[in-house]
Image (cartoon, rainbow, N blue to C red):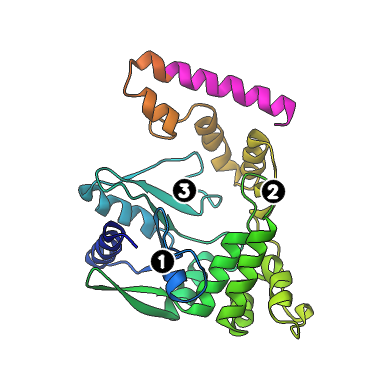
Amino acid sequence: MSYQHELVYALLSNVADQVGIDIVFIKGPVLHWQGLRSKEHSGDVDCWVRPGDETILAAAMEKWGWRAARTAFDGTPVAHSLALMPGDWGCEIDVHTRFPGVTVDDSTAFDLVLAATVTRTFAGTQVLVPSPAIHAVIYALHELRPVAGRRNTPEQRSAAVRALTSAGDSTIDVTEQLGAGFVLKDALREAFPDFDPSGISTPIPSDWGWRSVMSVPRRQLAAVRLLPWRQRARVVRRLVWPARDASRRIRAASELHPTAVFLVRVKRVRDGFVRLLRGD
């Protein structure tokens, strides 16, 4: 792990403590330390906070050079994390408020994770990380989630099974507690041949359907349908005409003449309608 990432872990933990919020660091080098993943390093830092605390943490990190990257689904049940874009630090932070594949209440899920944390020292600061069993379930969910409509690869499924096996059969109880049986039942059966999946509840995660749609505009529309009516118009407006800092293309254009931003937005609208009609 790079010294820079160690400093970011320590900084985030101290800032969270200063503003009075709980924070748990997930994925990254801790997975390697716990024997759940062979890869040692990660490109960014992932953490998990209680729903609502992500905006507090984002505001507190501004003076250190990070800015929240806005998306159309901010503040809605569809969003599962808030990305903090770095300045000179060069390390993006992903602040989770829930984890895809978990079906229990978001606050309940965080409390379950927080109650079973262990400590790990980064840059002389002790930070909270999930217990191996909980972390294995988190990592398995990460590997098995649909991304941009694409299902997981055999390599990802193998990685999920290896993590669950390494953490032991207590991952079965964790899966039940987090309501993650729909995603993990097959991986658990492979990891533990004596396990009977019929005894575990398997509610379907609300976001699994739209995540499985290949077409970008159709995937976005499927996500919009999950929202309360009062939020839909605002989100559609953001999707069609995003804020200046809502995408890398628009942020890059913002450094040029204002006309460039307008043209990027127009091209985005045109491309979106074409892809919607074609089903791309």
Residue 263 lies in the magenta-colored region: yes
Q: Amino acid at mark 2?
A: Ser
Q: Residue at x 58, y 59 (%)?
A: 100
Residue 29: mark: 1
Image depth: mark 3 or mark 1 in front: 1
In the picture of the structure, the residue carrying the numbered disc 3 is: 75
Q: Residues within 10 Å of mark 3 (few under 14, many from 20)?
A: some
Image depth: mark 2 or mark 3 in front: 2
Image coords of residue 262 (percent x, y): 43, 17
In the picture of the structure, the residue carrying the numbered disc 2 is: 212
Please state which of residues 101 and 193 is positioned toward the viewer in this rendering.
193
Examine the rendered structure and indicate whether residue 99 appears above or below residue 230.
below
State which quarter of the image contains the C terminus: top right
Mark 1 residue element: helix
**Considering only order in the chain, which callout, 1 or 2, is on the residue closer to the N terminus?**
1
What span is in magenta? Answer: 262-280
From where the camera sits, is residue 67 visible?
yes
Alpha carbon separation for disc pair 2 and 3: 22 Å
Alpha carbon separation for disc pair 3 and 1: 29 Å
Judged left or right of residue 18, residue 39 is right
Q: Quadrant of residue 20?
A: bottom left
Q: Residue at x 31, y 56 (%)?
A: 57
Examine the rendered structure and indicate whether residue 207 appears above or below residue 125.
above
Image coords of residue 126 (percent x, y): 28, 75
Alpha carbon separation for disc pair 2 and 1: 28 Å
Image coords of residue 252 (percent x, y): 37, 27
Asked whether the beta carbons under mark 2 and mark 1 sit within 8 Å of each other, the answer is no
Image coords of residue 51 (percent x, y): 44, 61
Q: Amino acid at mark 3?
A: Gly
Magenta span: predominant SS is helix
Q: Residue at x 62, y 44 (%)?
A: 148
Q: Residue at x 63, y 36 (%)?
A: 216
